[in-house]
Each structure stands twice: as C-alpha cells, then as structure tokens.
Amino acid sequence: MSFSITILGCSSSIPTNDRNPSGQIINYHDKLYLIDCAEGTQLQLRRYVGRIQRLHAVFISHLHGDHFFGLVGLVSTLHLLGRNKVLHIYGPQGLEEIIRLQLSYTHTELIYELIFHLTNPEVSELIFDEGELQVTTIPLDHRIPTHGFLFREKPGLRKIKKEIVLSEKIPYSEYENLKLGADYITADGTVIPNSSLTVSPPIPRSYAYCSDTRYTESIIPLIKDVDILYHEATFLKELSEQATLKYHSTAEQAAQIALLSGAKKLIIGHYSARYDDLNPLLEEAKSIFPETELAQDGLTMTVRKKLVTE
Amino acid sequence: MSFSITILGCSSSIPTNDRNPSGQIINYHDKLYLIDCAEGTQLQLRRYVGRIQRLHAVFISHLHGDHFFGLVGLVSTLHLLGRNKVLHIYGPQGLEEIIRLQLSYTHTELIYELIFHLTNPEVSELIFDEGELQVTTIPLDHRIPTHGFLFREKPGLRKIKKEIVLSEKIPYSEYENLKLGADYITADGTVIPNSSLTVSPPIPRSYAYCSDTRYTESIIPLIKDVDILYHEATFLKELSEQATLKYHSTAEQAAQIALLSGAKKLIIGHYSARYDDLNPLLEEAKSIFPETELAQDGLTMTVRKKLVTE
C-alpha cells in the first residue's frame, strides 16, 4: 500500500522562481490528499503528480494566503475539467465563506459537490477517518489560529498463518478473534498462543505536517515517533529573534523538535525567500538531527512499511 | 515616452505548463498598469517585468477566476515587500468584497492604501485620466458582465518652432495659444498661420484589450484605428459553435474585428488549453488580417510613436 508525500511548494509567503509557497500531496493507496494550497498549487499538482481528479480531500492549516490562495483556482479547474466526485475540504473558520463568495461572483455552479468540514485550531482532533487512514490536527503556535496535520495509518489486524491454522483445524469463525490477537483453546483445553498462529501486521506509518509555527514542545506528544516529520524552518538560527517575532522557527529549532519527538526523519521547508542557497539551513538542522532532508518543489518521499521483528 | 505591453498570460481558463491565464502589463512612462490578474500573475510579473512596486493601477475586466484569482496574492505580496504607495484597482461589483474578505480573514492590515473604483460593464466610460493617459472601458459580450479596456494617449499639444517664434518676436504669453493651434496676428494685422509656427504632436497612441467576448461589432466604434488590438481567440473557427455557446471568439472572428476597426496590428490570445500548437490559430487570423501576432507569455510589444506628415 503506497504512502508518499510530494512537495508542491517549499517557499514561505513570497514565491520565488524555484519555490512555490506551501502545498503538499499525500498519496495514500492511490488517493490524493492535498495539504495547503498556495497560489500556483494547481499547476504544481499537474506538473509533479498528475491526474488531479484523484484528489480526494484537501486540508488547510490556516488562513494565511500562502496556504490557501490557490484553493479557489483548484476548485474551479476541477469543475472545468469535469469532476464528478465529491471533494472534502478541512479547514478553519472563514475558508468556506471565502470560497463560496468567489464561486458566487464568478457565477460558478459546481458540477460536483464541495463539502467543508470546520476544524478547530485550539485542540487536537481526529478530523478524518476512512479506511486505513486517520488524520488528526496538531495545534501550532502561530500568529493566527493554525494547526498541522498528522496522517497516520490505523493499526492493522494480525495476519493468520494459514498453513498452521488449517493444520490445527481451527474453525473459520475464530479467524477474526485470532486477527485481533486472541489465543485459541482447543476442545481438550490446550492453549495455542496467538503468536504461533498469526504474525504481526506492519507497524502503522505516519507523517506529520507542522507549518507554520514557533518552536513549541507542546506538539511533541502528538507527533511522537512519527516516521517523517515536516517542520517549517523559515530562518537560520542567526535570525531566531525574527523567527520568534514572526511566529516561525529556525532550522535548529525544527531539528530539536525532530529529536525530542523521536522522529525517524525530518524534512524542513517554508524557507524565507532571502535564502538562495538552502544548504546552510540543512547543515544547521543536521548538526542536531542528522536524518534531515531539504524539501524542494517536486520532491517525493515514500513512507516505507516496517515489519515487526518477532 | 515608452508605451509597451507585456503578456503575462495567454491561456484561457485552465493554465498549462507554458501558458498562464490572463494578465498583461502596460508600461507607460515607466509606470506599470496591470490588466487582469489570473492565479500566478505575481510570479509572471516578477519573471517578465520586475520591479513590481512600480505597479500603479490594476484593471480587472470581469469576475471569472482566470482574470482575478491572482489579485489577492499580488496585493499581499506588495504588502510583504513593503509597498508604501497607494494602489488603485478598477473592476466590477464584487471585487472589493472578495479582496477585503480575504485580507480580513488573513488578519492582514495593509501598510499601503488600496482604493477600489467600481466599473460599470454596461456602458463605455472614461475610468482613468492621469497625465497623458486615459483608460476607457469597452463593454463586451460575455457570459457575465465584462468589459475590455482602451488605453489611449491624450492628443498632445502642438510643438513650437522656437527659432521662428523668436525671430517673429511673438510674446511668451501667446505660446499656450500657439500650442493649442491658434494663428498669430501681428501688430500690423498680418496673420501668421499656426502651421508655420508649430509642428504637429505625435499621433496619440492606443491599445485595446478585448477579452473575453463573443464576436460583437458593437465594439468597433470604440476601438476605431487602434494601434494594437488584443482580441481573444479561444478557438479555431471549426469550433465556432462552441465559441458562441461559451461566449468566446474564434481566431477568424478576432481578425474580422481587427479588419473592421482599422487596427494597425492584432494580437490574439486566451487560447483554449486544447491547443498545443498555436500556429493554426495564427494562420486562420492572418488569412483575414495579415498583421496578426500570437500572444505568448513574456512577449513585449512596443506601441511606437508616429509623427504626422505635414
């Protein structure tokens, strides 16, 4: 089952020639989930991902323009291209009003259904639960109400070792219990431990998106042991005062959060347009958290399955 | 005095990799005037024109997304880059509400003044008159209220032939009358004709922007003898039914308008995304109006001064 992230934009508020502002695509089981949608995102999506009608849901972290000004254009283009599936949009108060006002003035009666789901940036909430995927919000410390998103697989069921189960003549009606971890007790009272009848499912994978935010350790319990952490790193630490003032983070701070949360990997992004060369940001983060990578427009990362060693 | 047009986007509603939707810059005496502002226009502006704080006024033709979805992002970026000059925006009912609603939700208190001027798409009106430049609206025939814009220099004053005026000892107080075309009558009653004392000013230059519209001859008196006519050509004539249905024009129709209006040059654009190769559109227009050129993102055209031959 695929689980990948494609960066559509890694710039902060001002776009540069190489870097669009925020937008990311999660591809999970061939369904696309868009996180944030800066101006220009629809083009980045077509450029780097394609087949944009596979878009299943959109998640907007907050109402700064570099995170949502492209949404109305994307919604319109999906309409013009003949979309016939519902599109779910998750985001804070005001987003629906902004989009619907523009659709109204443009005289656009969408040929597909748009369903808005209001989020609450004050608390961490499970906002999406479909199939094997759950999305939870991560309250952040930004100038206006803002949350990140944790994409996490649900724990899977244990997998039955067919040969053994058949040879033990365990009835089919017991299979669901075995998958849930139950031992099996034979007619003569013998206990067959679950571990000999099943194997563990892969460890649930997870991806956390934390942009934009000041350094805040309040998010650590929410992103504990995440496979890939995207954390904004707008500035180098030499501009840490500015970072605090503008409710943003430095590369060092992003790395510190990765370290404290036990993340497997860190992706930094949301770079200030002042940085042409991003390597100083990378080096600063790596000095604290070596498993750091730079977000770049078009970069795709896979969250790999890991089996439990038993 | 410079007078040029730079195409920032020549696509119709859906952007392609090579073509952004509508946006054009008029550079007149080193002040920039933006016509329409599709998503992505701010980046095109920086890519092809630069020095975006020289932007003096914005003119929006109608409220279809491919003509204004980029405006809020541009307004925000000018703010982030420290603009301190007023920005005038001319456009139809709804535009101000859309922009101000988004600025409000993004908690943006602009550090410069934004002044909206409401246009009326039903009638041709002089909406801008500053220095030597005037802008008049051109009501178009589109699905929603829409107007184009005619940028036109005011007729200049006649220029005094200094040597002759001095040798005739004409008093300085008469100079303004001479510039306006008056003859000079000497103390002994001799009439010195104005044409021997002054030369004609250059012929006022003009540029007409007509997008989006069905074929309509009602615009011809408004754009009579224009130097450069931009007229949309969304489709080839083989799709003329579709053009009519969607309130757009074919390349042939654009050329017909250029011919009937006595335009010196025609630029076609607003191409449907279905056309990879634009040459058939060009050939179709040229068969009727040879002085046709294709709009392409980044193309700059100069409206040249012409002197009156006397």
Image (spheres, coloured by chain):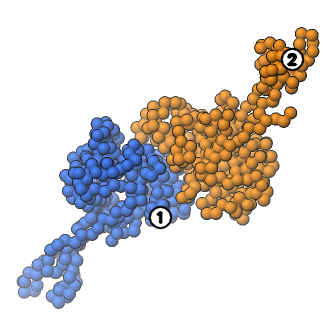
Chain colours: A orange, B blue
* B50 to B119, vertically: above or below: below
| Residue nearest the viewer, comparing B180 with A306 | A306
For badge 2, the amino acid type reads Tyr
The residue at the point 41 percent across, 53 percent down is: B9
Q: How many marks?
A: 2
The residue at the point 32 percent across, 37 percent down is: B242
Q: Quadrant of residue B134?
A: bottom left
Q: Please tell me whether mark 2 or mark 1 is closer to you in this view.
A: 2
For badge 1, the amino acid type reads Gly
The residue at the point 68 percent across, 60 percent down is: A235
Q: Residues within 10 Å of mark 1 (few under 14, many from 20)?
A: few
- Name the element at disc 1: loop
From the image, tell me which residue sits under label 1.
B50
Q: List x then y, in percent, for residue B99.
A: 48, 49
Which quadrant, please, contains the N terminus of chain A?
top right
Label ID, residue B88: none
From the image, tell me which residue sits under label 2.
A184
